[in-house]
């Protein structure tokens, strides 16, 4: 689809140097939890575009993306300063590692992978399914939503270094379709862990953020 201007409805801090931006969904916008979109903005007269994964459980009327903000960056600080009523351009959705109604889901995510994780996990619970979230980071984001997920029956594992024990616990508790989101090194490490446990990369839904 072509780039469409949409209205910003909310911008909130969800963790250290991390924000969530909620915008109106374009008409006929068909996006699934786990897919990503491109946001386009003009900063100091220059057109800039970045890709962000959906962090909302659906995109029927509103959609949300989670953005890591580099204080020395160009686009992140601009997005952080947006206010309700401002507009941004949106294009997409993109990506093939998305939720398709699987009844049991294990999400293994690092860093910015928490965005799609919370959206997918919330959707799984809404659908009456079972879900586990393993989230590796030095400083966790979306802790309020993760706590709510745990309160509503999700198995949530927040880890700061070794992800392997939590992956084993999540697979034992829930298993099902495995999703992996994160930077390339993290994704490779998790893919190796899964393969050692008999889960081939082709059977997992994996999205690397570079």
Image (spheres, rainbow, N blue to C red):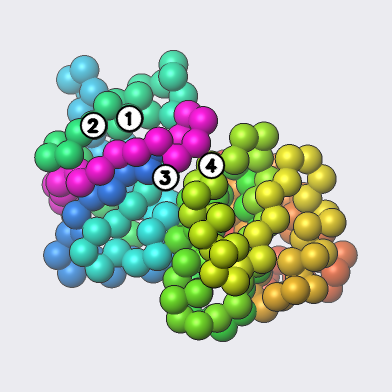
Q: Main secondary structure of the magenta part?
A: strand
Instruction: Give neighbour class at mark 4: few <14, some 14-19, many 20+ (Cα, 10 Å).
Output: many
User: Could you tell me if the residues under marks 1 and 2 are in contact, i.e. CB atoms within 8 Å?
Assistant: yes
Q: Position of residue 90 (x, y in %)?
A: 24, 49
Q: Cα distance, mark 4 to mark 2?
A: 20 Å
In the image shown, does 50 or 16 lie closer to the viewer?
A: 16
Q: Which residue is mark 3?
A: 66
**What secondary structure is marked by label 1?**
helix
Instruction: Give neighbour class at mark 2: few <14, some 14-19, many 20+ (Cα, 10 Å).
Output: some
Image disc number at residue 82: 2
The residue furthest front is 151
Q: Position of residue 75 (x, y in %)?
A: 34, 28
The disc, 4 or 3, on the residue closer to the chain's N-terminal end is: 3
Q: Residue at x 50, y 49 (%)?
A: 144
Q: Can the viewer see residue 192 in this picture? A: no
> Magenta stretch?
1-18
Q: Which residue is mark 4?
A: 141
Q: Position of residue 131 (x, y in %)?
A: 61, 71
The disc, 4 or 2, on the residue closer to the chain's N-terminal end is: 2
State left or right for residue 64 relative to residue 133: left
């Amino acid at each position: 689809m072509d780039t469409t201007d949409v209205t910003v409805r909310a911008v909130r801090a969800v963790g250290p140097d991390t924000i969530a931006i909620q915008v109106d969904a374009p008409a006929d916008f068909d996006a699934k939890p786990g897919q990503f979109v491109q946001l386009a903005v003009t900063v100091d007269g220059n057109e800039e575009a970045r890709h962000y994964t959906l962090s909302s459980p659906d995109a029927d009327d509103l959609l949300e993306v989670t953005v890591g903000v580099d204080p020395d960056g160009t686009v992140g600080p601009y997005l952080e300063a947006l206010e309700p009523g401002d507009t941004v351009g949106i294009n997409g959705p993109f990506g093939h590692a998305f939720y398709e109604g699987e009844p049991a889901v294990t999400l293994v995510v690092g860093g910015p992978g928490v965005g799609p994780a919370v959206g997918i996990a919330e959707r799984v619970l809404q659908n009456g399914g079972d879900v586990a979230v393993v989230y590796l980071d030095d400083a966790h984001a979306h802790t309020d939503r993760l706590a709510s997920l745990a309160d509503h029956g999700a198995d949530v594992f927040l880890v700061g270094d070794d992800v392997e024990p939590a992956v084993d616990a999540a697979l034992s508790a829930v298993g099902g379709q495995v999703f992996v989101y994160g930077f390339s090194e993290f994704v490779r490490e998790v893919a190796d862990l899964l393969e050692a446990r008999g889960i081939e990369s082709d059977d997992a839904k994996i999205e690397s953020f570079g």
